[in-house]
Image (tube, rainbow, N blue to C red):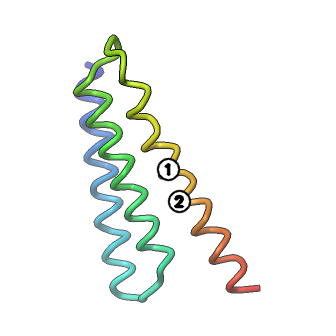
Amino acid sequence: MIESLSGVVTIGFILAAALSLQRAREGGDRFFIAFAFALALLAVNQLLALWLGDDHENVGYAYLLRVIAFLLILAALIARTWRRA
């Protein structure tokens, strides 16, 4: 059950990344490029966490991708806000 839900979340991240890339191509906004890259990192995080499993000793390192993705989204939001101000 958990594996199938993790797969659905991973597909959702990949779909959202593809839609963000399409939006970036239409508008030429760097924010959507950063957002798509962050969503791709979140998809890779889901895959690694599922592949390694809960009991693997290095599963914590896979979650560093999640931290990097959230920091990338935060940096893109700050850059977009400062550019508009």
Q: Nearer the viewer, residue 7 or 41?
A: 41
Which amino acid, by three-letter code, is at mark 2?
Leu
Mark 2, residue position: 72
Crowding near pointer 1: few (<14 within 10 Å), some, many (20+)?
Answer: some
**Quarter in which the C terminus is drawn:** bottom right
| Residue at 38% in and 78% down | 23
| Residue at 31% in and 77% down | 22
Image quadrant assignment for residue 32: bottom left
Up-down: is 25 above or below 4? below
Q: How many marks?
A: 2
Q: Which mark is residue 4?
A: none
Give the x, y percent position of residue 66: 46, 43
Crowding near pointer 2: few (<14 within 10 Å), some, many (20+)?
Answer: some
Relative side of 73 to 40, left or right? right
Which element is circle 2 on? helix
Relative side of 73 to 14, left or right? right
Tell me whether circle 2 and circle 1 mark residues in contact (CB < 8 Å).
Answer: yes
* Distance in Å between CA atoms under marks 2 and 1: 6 Å
Up-down: is 10 above or below 15? above
| Residue at 36% in and 16% down | 57
| Residue at 26% in and 37% down | 47
Which amino acid, by three-letter code, is at mark 1?
Ile
Mark 1, residue position: 68
Give the x, y percent position of residue 46: 33, 37
Up-down: is 5 above or below 53? below
Give the x, y percent position of residue 12: 31, 49
**Quarter in which the N terminus is drawn:** top left
Q: Nearer the viewer, residue 49 or 5?
A: 49
Which element is circle 1 on? helix
